Structures are given as structure tokens and as C-alpha cells.
Image (cartoon, grey):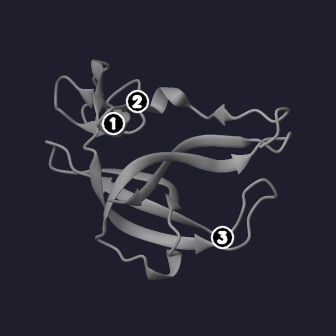
Amino acid sequence: MSEDTKEEIYRPDLFVTDGSGTRLVGGCCKKCSYHTFPKYFACPNCFSDEIEDVLLNPIGKLHAFTIVRRSMPDYPVPYGLGLVDFPTNFPSAVRVMAQIESKDLENLQTETDMKIVIGAVRKNKDGGDIKSYKFARS
């Protein structure tokens, strides 16, 4: 990358990175413990507005995926796009969609353990990377 192109982070409020890795910041209802990602203003389960930030589990299971071979101009192809279920203490998991970071997209399988990583998701108008959270095999 040249000195003229700048790297950008898209929605840094949606994740945190520390020495143990990257985790998504979701919401948890204080009344019924329903989890969401991203954090909602009101709980879709009980309609309470008492929502607190919570870090989602660092490992989830790949629920479904596709390989994108044609996309918008600023999105280098091919890339994987997946739905990953992150377990919670509520009866249902939080399902999140994001790109999949993999050198071997053709051998992805559902039920694979996935973790959150930070990587380039597209290019900005100057050709620099726009980075955000992605999935990678755990």
C-alpha cells in the first residue's frame, strides 16, 4: 500500500480486540437475557429498553455460507460470506453474517468452528483497505 492510501476501520464500535483475540460487542437484555448483534435499542423478545453491552462468545459454528464470485467493484472476489451462530445463555444463539477469511473456500463445511478476525472487506475510493470483522476457521 502506498503512503497516499489510508487504511480505514468500518464500525469499530462492533468489536474489541485485545491480547486474547477479537470479540463482537452485542447487547443483552437485563430483563430476559436475550442477546442481539448488533446491540439493539430495545429487546425484540420482551421489548425492554434495559440493554447492556456484552461480548459474544469468541467461537461460533458456521451455520451456512456461500462463495461470492461476482460483486460490487470495490469488493475483491472470490470471498466467502457466512452465517455463524454464537452461543449465549439464552435458549437461542446469536446469528451473525460476515465475510469469511480463508485461502481454501472450496473446502468450507457447515458446523466448522469459526472465530472473529480483523481483515480487509473492501477497498476505499483511494484503493486503501477498509477493514472490519470477518470469520476465520478457529
Q: Residue at x 50, y 66 (%)?
A: 102
Q: Is residue 7 above or below residue 129?
A: above
Q: Height in image: 126 above or below 80? A: above
Circle 2 sits in a helix, a strand or a loop, which is it?
A: loop
Horizontal and vertical percent position of residue 118: 50, 44
Q: How crowded is the residue under tag 1: few (<14 C-alpha within 10 Å), some, or many (20+)?
A: few
* Residue nearest the observer in this picture, 3 or 11: 3
**Considering only order in the chain, which callout, 1 or 3, is on the residue closer to the N terminus?**
1
- Mark 2 lies on residue: 40
Give the residue at x 28% y 39%: 56
Q: State left or right for residue 16 relative to residue 74.
A: left
Residue hosting label 1: 44
Real-space Cα distance between discs 3 and 1? 35 Å
Q: Quadrant of residue 28?
A: top left
Query: Looking at the image, is mark 3 or mark 1 nearer the viewer?
Result: 3
Q: Position of residue 124 (x, y in %)?
A: 78, 41
Q: Position of residue 52 (x, y in %)?
A: 28, 21
Residue 89's quadrant in the figure?
Answer: top left
Are there few (<14), some (14-19), or many (20+) residues within 10 Å of tag 3? few
- What is the three-letter code of the residue carrying label 2? Tyr
Disc 3 target residue:
78
Q: Secondary structure at mark 3?
A: loop
Report the residue that reaches farthest toward the top: 50
* Residue 93 circle label: none
Question: Which quadrant, please, contains the N terminus?
Answer: top right
Q: SS for tag 1? A: loop
Disc 2 vs disc 1: Cβ atoms closer than 8 Å? yes
Q: CA distance from mark 3 to mark 2?
A: 32 Å
Say which residue appears at 27% left-offset and 37% top-offset: 35
**Counting residues from the N terminus, which is met first, the one under dot 3 or under dot 2?**
2
